[in-house]
Image (cartoon, helix red, strand yellow):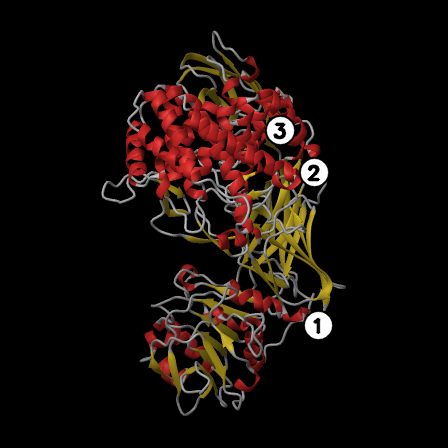
Amino acid sequence: MRRSIVIFTILFGVGFSLPYWTEQDFINADSIPRLDPIMQYDVGPLRTEWQMWSYVHELCQTAAFIASMQVSDTLDPEFGGLIEGEDAMGVVETDNTQEAIWVWCRYYQITGDTTYFVNLRRAWIYVLNHPAWLEEGTDSDYYRVWNCGLAFFAESKYRTITGDSSYMPYADTCSQYMLGHPLPFTGVPQTYARLHPKVTSLAAGMLYQYGKEMNNQTWKDTALAYGDRVRVWVEANPNVNINDEVWAMSGGTAVWGLCRSIFDADSSFGVTWLSTYLPYMKYYQPAGTWNNSWNIWYANAYNFSARITQNGTYVDYHHSITDSLLIQDYDNDGGVPPTRGWNENQDHSWISSYMVFMGFEGLMDSVRTYDAGVNGIYATGPRPFLLIGDTVQVAVQAANYGFAALSDVYLEVTDAFSGDTTVDLAIGVEDTFALANIFIPSDTGYLSFTGYSLYAGDERPANDTFTTSIYVRPLRFVSGTVIDTVNSTGIDAKLYFQFLDDSGASYFDSTETNPSTGIFSVYLIDSLYRAYIYTDIPYPDSVAEYIYVTPDSVSDFDFAFGPADLLVINRDNEARYADYYAAPLDSLNITCKVWAPQNQGLFPMSRIDEFNYNTIIWYTGQAVVDNVTSSEQESLMVFLDSGGKLLITGQNVGEEISGTQFYSDYLHAVLVSDSINSLKCFPDTLDALGQDIGKLYTVGITGAQNQYSRDVIAADTLAHEFLYYDSLLTDCAGIWYEDAISGCQIVYCAFGVEAVHKPIPWLGYMTRTQLLERFLSWFGVVAVAEGSVERPYSLFSVFPNPSHRQVYITMGSSLVGKTGSLRVYDITGRLVKTIFDEQSLDGLSWYLDDSHGRRLSSGVYFLSLETADINDMRKVIIVD
């Protein structure tokens, strides 16, 4: 019984409470798009041999997973109940708990291990405190009837394996409730007209089997009557009714109930009926909320249909659908999500139990008593790939596929490597065993490894051999130069080469240039790389995309840079947020050198004249201290006295240094308050600088989202206020100052410019790029002609990246007024979506979907922007 209601969002923002649904919940669920189903006639040959899963091992893992989801606090009113899922920890239900009872009983039946007996006792405590007939049911009895059906299921299995009949009265009461509450098929809202027949069929199957076991003719007769009602309902519109999915049930639920009731009583009629109507039923539903539940019900229906008709194709259907759930155990903990595409942190207890009693249980007929097998070979070196000369540990993965514990199982790996070991495999065990011998590759290419298991009396040799190949990569010599575009002299630089087809977490190798010549060399494996180039002052650090190293590619790469236009000082305490300045500057064709004093030391201000412009952007991010140190203040005062241009921006600058000479005599600022709760900024349209600035919004996903303590400031008599936190222009957010003698110019923003975000539909608001362009234009910083220098960043930006839900794509000002196309490619170069084609280049959102609206799987993708004169590309990483 649910004591709390959890609302969560799925895909398109539709909310549900789990698992009992009201009519509105059903309406919400049906609003989520589904893909076209896979029908029986669309399915080719499924397999020539059964996949190498140890279903006993998988059952053991699932038993452990659902045990981890049981409430164990004896003081909790939900004690003993099963939690809904990893992302629904506040929901505890009776149906989940009764399903878990069956799984733990089956575990004991196979292994003889009493580990989960304590879980069984706790589960029964919960069930008796929250009986099935008192579950939710405000506008329909479907959930109570469903729970009562599972009560028979749980009590029967528990009594069978323990001999304890003390819970039979509970099941008897459930039967009385079920007999007294038949669910109507007509005269109810459409959602219940779809759901009630499926729940009724479940009730028919469960009640009939329990009636047979208890020799209760009333129960059997009622179950057959229920089953016949469902049969008539299916026959009325088989193409629709046998394929419908709603809540956690599908047409497979209806067919399963018929197989376990009226077809169990008359198998000849079952053969005839199934031959006529089962071809209408789909094979698989690839999308939809809880589609894994729908599909395992289809699998269950095919399993029992195969037992009645002896149709081997239905056996294969059941097997392959079961495996489709099993491969979604992404974290190998025995749990799976209810919806395909959810991640490893969204496993649910109930669907994991379904996988056991609807999936694995139907495959247990194939399990032998004595069966060892090999299902993996692993070679672990010092990095994710192998090179000649690496020291490699080889391990073989073996499993006990059978029902009996195995001793002295011999494992061997041959071909490119030779090693062996002898192990014991308890029931349900699958493990990886390291071999004593060390492998040192002496050649490149694909090397074959074959693993064997040998056990006297092994009853299934098909899984005793496993063959794979391991690739040893060649190293190739790569060289090049990093030079100054103005005088062709070498640049002192360090280069890091990173895989583009890797997770992006690590570099493969790095090298440095000869400071006098700019020449570098490095050995790289065949792959696609990004090169990070970190240069000496005054050159911009750069990123070179799409460096191919292959046998046929060039082996020389030359990088040329001119001095950066300006300097960006990153004074954030963790040196974050640089891209919030560098990317907009790049879209303006303005290059910058980013310097982080906390990592690189005090910037040598004497070298500022090496930049194209005597300009500094100084931002402080989330820094509380060391926004501008005393020594940095002294350097900045010398810089400004010589006519420098300074944009200083930060939410805690005034709070820290308001009492200093630099703050009062150079910034010409007065601190009014160290905190204001305002998200917007409004310009003084009568001010010389403010007249060309729009409104600003300092919260939003395209900004840094790091503002928590914006300062309120005021200008002294020499400076000018141009930006305010309120439309009445009372609380100042920005001032400017210009010295007629030295020529210095200062813009001081008492908030972080990195946080500026323009909501796309809001008129009158500026982007961060537009704001920086206005400031720099006032400083006299103009864009370098496009194409005259190498650019370290793309002409459009993508944020956030990596992303799991959506990304915002922002176009640089140089693209304004142009038309073009934006396409998405996967790592193989395959086109997966055209976002727009020959349209105006405006900012937009992309929801990480393909051309059919399906969310793309996690991995690396490339956004390609094409105009008449530009072809630019950005990598996007999609994560679960």
> Taking 184 as reference, is 106 above or below it?
above
Decide which of tag 3 and tag 1 comes sooner along the chain: 3
Which is closer to the viewer, label 1 or label 2?
1
- Judged from the image, the secondary structure of the residue bearing numbered disc 1 is loop
The image's mark for residue 817 is 1
User: Left or right: 68 with respect to 355?
Assistant: left
Quadrant in which the N terminus is drawn = top left
How many marks the image carries: the answer is 3
User: Left or right: 657 with respect to 770?
Assistant: left
Q: Which amino acid does label 3 sit on?
A: Thr
Q: Name the residue under label 2.
A: 551
Question: Where does residue 493 sit, x and y in percent of width and height?
Answer: 55, 55
Q: 680 or 315: nearer the eye? A: 315
Residue 26 visible in the snapshot = yes
Q: What residue type is labelled 2?
A: Pro
Q: Mark 3 points at which residue?
A: 444
- Judged from the image, the secondary structure of the residue bearing numbered disc 3 is loop
Q: How far apart are marks 3 and 1 (CA)?
A: 52 Å
Asked where in the image residue 263 lies, by quadrant, the reply is top right
